[in-house]
Image (cartoon, rainbow, N blue to C red):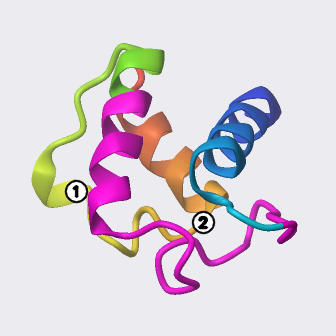
Amino acid sequence: MEDMKEIIKKYVINEYVEDDSEVTYDTPLISGGIVDSFSMVSLKRFLENKYKISIPDDKATPDAFDSVNKICVLVNAYLK
């Protein structure tokens, strides 16, 4: 799971962090203002393509996307 955490963290930093803010596995992404609702859609698409999964829209909640750790839990729930 560590590889997944690093991949997701690097994606978030590359796509959404505009300054030198440090992002950890527990950094609040949605509630901290790093990822907004539009960005969440592109992050969901990235995860689905990267891990060959389908995340139901009703499970793609701001809470589920609020940290790298929470995103990993969500992704792992849909891995085969």
- Image spot of residue 22 (x, y percent): 87, 67
Regarding residue 42, the answer to whether it shows in the image is yes
- Image spot of residue 16 (x, y percent): 58, 56
| Residue at point 69%, 62% (across, down) | 18
- Residue furthest toward the front? 18
| Residue at point 12%, 58% (across, down) | 58
- Does residue 2 belong to the magenta stretch? no
Q: Nearer the viewer, residue 12 or 50?
A: 12
Of label 1 and label 2, which has the lower sequence position? Answer: 1
Task: Determine which residue is flagged by label 2.
Answer: 67
| Residue at point 37%, 18% (across, down) | 49
- Residue furthest toward the bottom? 31
Magenta residue span: 20-47
Task: Determine which residue is flagged by label 1.
Answer: 59
Q: Amino acid at mark 2?
A: Ser
Q: For the residue carrying disc 1, how many other residues have a C-alpha within 10 Å: few (<14), some (14-19), or many (20+)?
A: few
Q: Say which element carries label 1.
A: helix
| Residue at point 34%, 26% (across, down) | 48
Q: Say which element carries label 2.
A: loop
Q: Quadrant of residue 59?
A: bottom left
Relative to residue 15, is residue 9 drawn left or right?
right
Kindly report which numbered mark, 1 or 2, lies closer to the viewer in this rendering: 2
Q: Nearer the viewer, residue 58 or 33?
A: 33
Query: Where the C terminus falls, by quadrant?
Result: top left
Query: Relative to residue 67, is residue 73 depicted above or below?
Result: above
Question: Residue 51, labelled with which disc?
Answer: none
Query: Where the N terminus falls, by quadrant?
Result: top right
Q: Nearer the viewer, residue 53 or 80?
A: 53
Whole-angstrom CA distance, mark 1 to mark 2, is 15 Å
Relative to residue 46, is residue 2 drawn left or right?
right
Q: Quadrant of residue 2?
A: top right
